[in-house]
Image (cartoon, coloured by chain):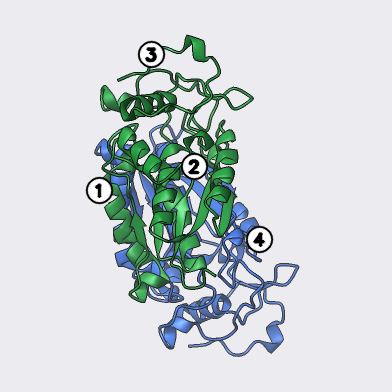
Chain colours: A blue, B green
Amino acid sequence: MNAGKRRAVVLCSGGIDSTTALAIACSEHFQPYCLSFSYGQRHTIELQAARRIARAFNASEHLCLDIALDRIGASALTTAAPVPRGTPAAEGTGAIPTTYVPARNTIFLAYALALAEARACSEIFIGVTAVDYSGYPDCRPEYIEAFQRMADLATREGVEGRAIRIRTPLIHLSKSEIIQTGIRLGVDYGMTHSCYDPAPDGAACGACESCLLRRKGFAAARVADPTRYADPEHLSPAPR
Amino acid sequence: MNAGKRRAVVLCSGGIDSTTALAIACSEHFQPYCLSFSYGQRHTIELQAARRIARAFNASEHLCLDIALDRIGASALTTAAPVPRGTPAAEGTGAIPTTYVPARNTIFLAYALALAEARACSEIFIGVTAVDYSGYPDCRPEYIEAFQRMADLATREGVEGRAIRIRTPLIHLSKSEIIQTGIRLGVDYGMTHSCYDPAPDGAACGACESCLLRRKGFAAARVADPTRYADPEHLSPAPR
């Protein structure tokens, strides 16, 4: 039985990073409570991936919440605006790309905090990375540290001196280091999904910023890319 | 036209505090974007009040989001647990009452931050008070200050040096001072609703912690209480 096991909320998007964070939580013997969000994004296929992954890791619970971000709008991921193709903005000008969803990680972490309180979890794992990321302000270490300080004051646990810890085990890892970490822990990345603009059958486009980061990561990690692409023969070479 | 008016998100629960915060935002010539939440609470009657109030203050928008807190649970306000009657816990032992909803204000403010980004609002008004409150950790000034520091790092605006300000104009006011402020600004408190456990027709119970705080506030402010109570003849005297 798992009665004495420590519990952790793990934010699960169905992608490489959150799946690796989940594998790390399990390797530290946490009993995972997986939390995913549906928010009018086009890629609900990633939620199916999250469900498969939560099951594969024997999660105690997989809560998928519909959180209505599409009614707030202002992102290419939640509105009808086109998803950009090509190199992620963060590597070029430093500008925040149109796929940025306003305050998304703040909303995700706020729900994770509520679930951690309600299920007596001592930690929250989130797979953000400040290395191979997309230029979103809410992926930076200083943001996470500020969220932690706020969380310490927000909750019953914080008031009672048992703060809920926000864990970001990937924050200083590149995509290839994340993949190498997951491979060491036995992650099957064939279960994961990253594409912002998949075909109806779930195949990845290979060209959006999320696919490019993914392809670059597998190439740099020298690991075979298990992703099913819509048009593998006509993919441009993996970016370096 | 209001083209040049500054915009503010105002969190609207339909109660006394948020309605007074809305009146203050309007008195400072902000164009209000009202934001309310439905979260499986028993008192959806308060959302009808919020709608009336947003209309009365000519809000540019009133967004009511369904945010699924009932699927997280762990509060007497979102589950089948009984709503306690009697004196609010904060005035007695300092314990956090069972009506505490895990991380509620953090979730509310996270959505407000997203809406402020999406609608180009420079401020967020929230009617929290650390004086006549219910002992919730996320109503304290130090919590709000920590949320502000986190928000400065979370958003596009923060990165670009135009931080979104969290405004808490009631934080050091007692309930009676809040009511006196609102009366000076012309608020009709007959539009507002506070009860945690109303009758099917919307009449207030007069006995839950929220009703007791409200009744005490009107008594101390020496303002006639416009609330419609389910059983006015048998109400215990307003607490002091």
Residue A190 appearing in the image: yes
Q: Residue at x 58, y 43 (%)?
A: B52
Label 2 with label 1: CB-CB less than 8 Å = no
Alpha carbon of mark 1 to alpha carbon of mark 3: how far? 35 Å
Label 2 with label 3: CB-CB less than 8 Å = no
Which of discs 4 and 3 lies nearer the camera? The answer is: 3
Q: Amino acid at mark 4?
A: Thr
Q: Residue at x 59, y 22 (%)?
A: B199
Alpha carbon of mark 4 to alpha carbon of mark 2: how far? 31 Å
Q: Amino acid at mark 2?
A: Ser
Disc 1 sits on a residue from what chain?
B
Disc 2 sits on a residue from what chain?
B
Q: Residue at x 50, y 61 (%)?
A: B115
Q: Which residue is mark 1?
A: B142
- As displayed, is residue A162 above or below residue B225? below
Label 1 with label 3: CB-CB less than 8 Å = no
Q: Quadrant of residue B174?
A: top left
Alpha carbon of mark 1 to alpha carbon of mark 4: how far? 38 Å
Alpha carbon of mark 2 to alpha carbon of mark 3: how far? 26 Å
Q: Which residue is mark 2?
A: B13
Residue B128 point in image, percent of width and height:
36, 43
Query: Which is nearer the eye, A64 or A176?
Result: A64
For label 4, the SS is loop
For label 3, the SS is loop
Q: Are marks 4 and 3 on the same chain?
A: no
Residue A231 point in image, percent of width and height:
72, 82
Judged left or right of residue B118, residue A139 is: left
Q: Which residue is mark 3?
A: B237
Residue at far top of view: B234
